[in-house]
Image (cartoon, rainbow, N blue to C red):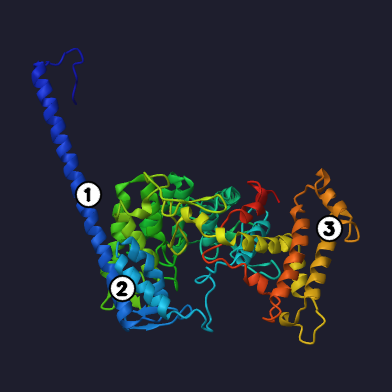
Amino acid sequence: MIFLNLNTRPKVLTVQPSIIGKMFRISVVILLLAVTHSEVGFARNMENLKDRVRKIFYHAYDNYLKYAYPLDELRPLSCDGHDTWGSFSLTLVDALDTLVIMGNVTEFRRAARALLDHLDSEKNVNASVFETNIRGDPRYEAVATRALKAMWKYRSSLGLLGNHIDVITGSWTARDATIGSGVDSYFEYLVKGAALFRLPELDSMFREYRLAIEKHIRHGDWNPMINKDKGGVTMAVFQSLEAFWPGLLALTGDIECARRHLIAYHEIWRKYGFLPEFYSLSDEKAYKGREAYPLRPELIESILYVYRATRDPALIDMGVDILTSIEVSARTPCGFATVSDVTKHTLEDRMESFFLAETTKYLYLLFDENNFIHQLPGEKTSLEGSRLPSGLQCYPESGGYIFNTEAHPIDPGALNCCFAPQLDEVEQASKVETLFSDSNHFKMLSNHEFDSDTNTYDQVTETDLLSTIDSVFSEHVQSQLGYSLSDSFARIINQSSSNCFNNAYFDSNLIVSWIELREIIKSSALETEKENDKFSFLDSTKTPLLTCPYPSFQNRFALSGLLTST
């Protein structure tokens, strides 16, 4: 036992002030040298890690070009290729922006030119609409918007969604609520769509879903599948696709919860060296029959987002774990292969295109602190913009890039640049969408029995189309106002401006849109008589890049929270 004499004063060492000053200066110099040495060492280590990622990328990329191009994917065990998603050189398409991010603009230009010269987009093939859905056509934007609103309305009483729905009947065909397969990209695009298109109601929708997820799905650090109506656990598993969730939480600002999930997911990686597709939470082992790891990017994606938010060096170590596992256990002489069983590290003869589009890209960006992709809006000291005819300022490459779910960066500053020459055409498409968006009459139009032997759209006359549109409008107006087409336009329009007409179920712009739509159809019919195509006016609404959110897109959602209140 040790006794301390609290009454004994310690001896004091007296040091001259001049010596103290010298000691302080020496200590500061030593500390600065140590910090500088540490920073230099960190920078050198990051350069080394970037180089390792580049070697992985080019080993896969070069062998794809050597053995598989122009087919969709490389088979890394057979050293040949095969088509999977539509026969359009998918791996090369997916790898293009990774080349730019890694600084190889020369190869990007060469590869892009090869695709432009040889890619045939008119092939009659079975293509995945998930992989090939960028069309620059506002009609698809309108349909996606309606689907978004419908999904919100089909929530269960617990505020949850299933993961598969019958688009004809609206019945859920898979009633398991999850954050993983089937709905992961839906949640991701609510958050990213809110930022990219400046639609706060999408963020409001996500936060409502998040409350339901936290209340009913989350169990500690895990999110098992549950019944969307009753709330009971239906499958106690972790899906590897769920590994995107911490990154999404980081984007919404919930860093602490993101860290907790990320640490839990990384523990599974450390256990096997990879993430199995399913991991049993009850048995604490890879789920039988779902032991594969197809080089997925979701875990490294989340590590990147959380690291950018925290700069926690432990996350770099997590990234090194992933990099090393791929280098050691997935490499083949011709590329990198899917791990068919994470418990045995056996390989399967497939390298999916997302390995070059996502996994290697996220790894590289984790180790490249100063990549242009990390630039935030406003960080540029000078911006080169141009004033468009619409009055909007166009600032491409001004930072704030947002990745789509396949890790292709979208430049928000370029959104204003893409639609100015087509403002009138986009507005025409908006009128078509507005007429049918909040009613069930679009189905009536598509099923309308026209006076034709063939009952095909090619035989529809201008009169048929106008008559159908008039009947749709008449029914809609009469149900809301009690007026019909026999009333004067002036009376209907005056009524539309009154307070009693202002409700969530009727858009006052619909009347003007209806009148203008009739004129569009009439003029279009005259212009297209020689072409024998009564619907070409709709094709004229296609834009060369993408449908921009201003002004028509925003006009459909006038106030924040409109979706969540209807």
Among the two numbered marks 2 and 3 on one chain, the one whose residue lies closer to the N terminus? 2
Which residue position is annotated with label 1?
Answer: 42
What is the CA distance from the residue labelled 3 to the residue labelled 1?
68 Å
Among the two numbered marks 3 and 1 on one chain, the one whose residue lies closer to the N terminus? 1
Q: Amino acid at mark 2?
A: Ala
Q: Residue drawn at (62%, 70%), measured in percent from left and top?
A: 540
Mark 1: give few (<14), some (14-19) or many (20+) Cα within 10 Å.
Answer: few
Residue that extends furthest to the right in the rendered view of this protein: 486
Q: Is residue 275 visible?
A: no
| Residue 302's disc number | none
Q: Quadrant of the N terminus?
A: top left
Which residue position is annotated with label 3?
Answer: 477
Q: Secondary structure at mark 3?
A: helix
Whole-percent x and y of residue 208?
60, 49
Which residue position is annotated with label 2?
Answer: 60
Quarter of the image for residue 139 reads: bottom right
What is the CA distance from the residue labelled 2 to the residue labelled 3?
60 Å
Q: Amino acid at mark 1?
A: Phe
Among the two numbered marks 1 and 2 on one chain, the one whose residue lies closer to the N terminus? 1
Q: Residue drawn at (46%, 63%), measured in percent from left and top?
A: 241
Mark 2: give few (<14), some (14-19) or many (20+) Cα within 10 Å.
Answer: many
Task: Determine contact: label 3, label 1, CB under 8 Å.
Answer: no
Dot in front, 3 or 1: 3
